[in-house]
Image (cartoon, rainbow, N blue to C red):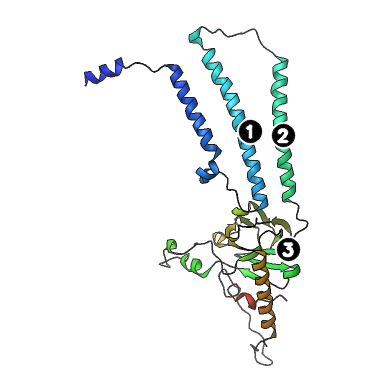
């Protein structure tokens, strides 16, 4: 045993309690300052801002409620800590056993929480009503979920464009058992498709979401919203990507839709309005050209057509060229 070390430790002067409290308060203040820039310094610890009007509104409410909760925690725990330090037994404090009821205190701690809840409920309700308001949309798209692909059908000015969006071949091959492919070498493994959904930025896009078999859920995290695709029902959703945020955004089916549920990604390609108009024109021209080409007969005269087996995920139907899929 090192007696010299023990002696040094025992004669080391004790740190004053005030210094310990000041140090704790300093660390707490530093954490508050770091939290104020959490979106930049700690992006993984905070809710993402997103790229749509709704995602920005949701993030704003999230931060407002967060700071209200921080203020409440500081006030409540501050009073508790002050009471514990000031009225502790070591300083001769004696408990008051005569006080059993205080009407003023009960009214105060009832009114204050009610006011806080109402103040937070007003902007939250306003945003919830805004999420469900799909009026005045500049573009409408019908989204139909299948096991395990999505079908996008454009309505209005872009009517006639319809295609299936299926897991890309690179991810589909790599996911097979004993494929010998390292998934880390596949770009955007399980998050890439053959035909992404294309929408313009700065335009309110209304999505009519349904399903043809089981319950699915259309979800792109950067858009800040999600809707279930239920057979026999049509749910509405709208997104408006802010100008300057054009690009490719990825998501997944967020419902446990059965076997191969994890292989049903969602990819949205956001273009500028001008580029989107060019894309629509090119698709319509290709569809018109494809409809003019005569379709060769696949069966001989007086011969019954051969029934085909149902197609599964990644089958040839979903991998046909986009321009070859024409609305009936």
Screen quadrant of the C terminus:
bottom right
**Where residue 229 sits: x, y (%)?**
68, 58
Q: Quadrant of residue 11?
A: top left
Residue picked out by circle 3? 140
**CA–CA distance between discs 3 and 1?**
38 Å
Q: Nearer the viewer, residue 126 or 41?
A: 41
Q: Decide: is 300 above or below 251.
A: below
Q: Identify the mark at residue 68; answer none if there is no mark.
A: 1
Asked which secondary structure carries label 1, the reply is helix
Horizontal side of 25 relative to 73 (left or right) equals left
**CA–CA distance between discs 3 and 2?**
35 Å
Mark 3 nearby-residue class (10 Å; few <14, some 14–19, many ≥20): many
Residue farthest to the bottom? 301
**Where residue 318 sits: x, y (%)?**
60, 72
Asked which secondary structure carries label 3, the reply is strand
Mark 3 or mark 1, earlier in chain: 1
Residue picked out by circle 2? 119
**Where residue 36 sits: x, y (%)?**
55, 38
**CA–CA distance between discs 1 and 2?**
10 Å
**Where residue 80 sits: x, y (%)?**
57, 20
Q: Nearer the viewer, residue 274 or 162?
A: 274
Q: Decide: is 317 above or below 84.
A: below
Q: Are marks 1 and 2 in contact (CB under 8 Å)?
A: yes
Mark 1 nearby-residue class (10 Å; few <14, some 14–19, many ≥20): few
Mark 3 or mark 2, earlier in chain: 2
Q: Identify the mark at residue 87; answer none if there is no mark.
A: none
**Residue occupying the point 44% across, 21% down:** 20
């Amino acid at each position: 045993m090192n007696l010299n070390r023990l002696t040094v430790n025992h004669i080391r002067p004790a740190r004053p309690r005030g210094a310990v409290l000041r140090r704790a308060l300093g660390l707490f203040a530093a954490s508050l300052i770091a939290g104020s820039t959490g979106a930049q310094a700690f992006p993984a610890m905070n809710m993402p801002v997103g790229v749509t009007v709704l995602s920005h509104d949701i993030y704003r409410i999230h931060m407002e409620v967060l700071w209200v909760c921080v203020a409440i925690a500081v006030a409540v725990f501050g009073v508790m800590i002050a009471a514990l330090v000031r009225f502790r037994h070591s300083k001769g404090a004696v408990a008051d056993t005569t006080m059993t009821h205080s009407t003023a205190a009960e009214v105060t701690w009832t009114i204050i929480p009610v006011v806080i809840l109402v103040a937070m409920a007003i902007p939250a309700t306003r945003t919830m009503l805004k999420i469900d308001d799909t009026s005045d949309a500049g573009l409408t798209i019908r989204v139909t979920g299948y096991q395990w692909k999505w079908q996008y059908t454009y309505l209005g000015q872009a009517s006639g464009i319809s295609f299936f969006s299926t897991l890309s071949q690179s991810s589909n091959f790599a996911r097979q058992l004993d494929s010998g492919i390292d998934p880390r070498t596949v770009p955007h493994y399980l998050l890439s498709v053959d035909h992404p959904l294309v929408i313009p930025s700065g335009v309110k896009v209304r999505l009519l979401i349904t399903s043809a078999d089981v319950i699915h859920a259309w979800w792109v995290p950067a858009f800040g919203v999600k809707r279930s695709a239920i057979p026999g029902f049509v749910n509405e959703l709208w997104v408006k990507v802010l100008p300057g945020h054009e690009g490719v955004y990825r998501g997944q089916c967020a419902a446990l839709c059965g076997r191969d549920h994890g292989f049903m990604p969602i990819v949205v390609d956001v273009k500028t309005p001008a580029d989107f108009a060019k894309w629509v024109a090119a698709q319509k021209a290709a569809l018109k050209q494809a409809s003019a080409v005569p379709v060769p007969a696949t069966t001989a005269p007086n011969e019954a057509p051969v029934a085909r087996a149902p197609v599964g995920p990644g089958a040839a139907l979903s991998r046909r060229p986009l321009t070859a899929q024409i609305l009936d």
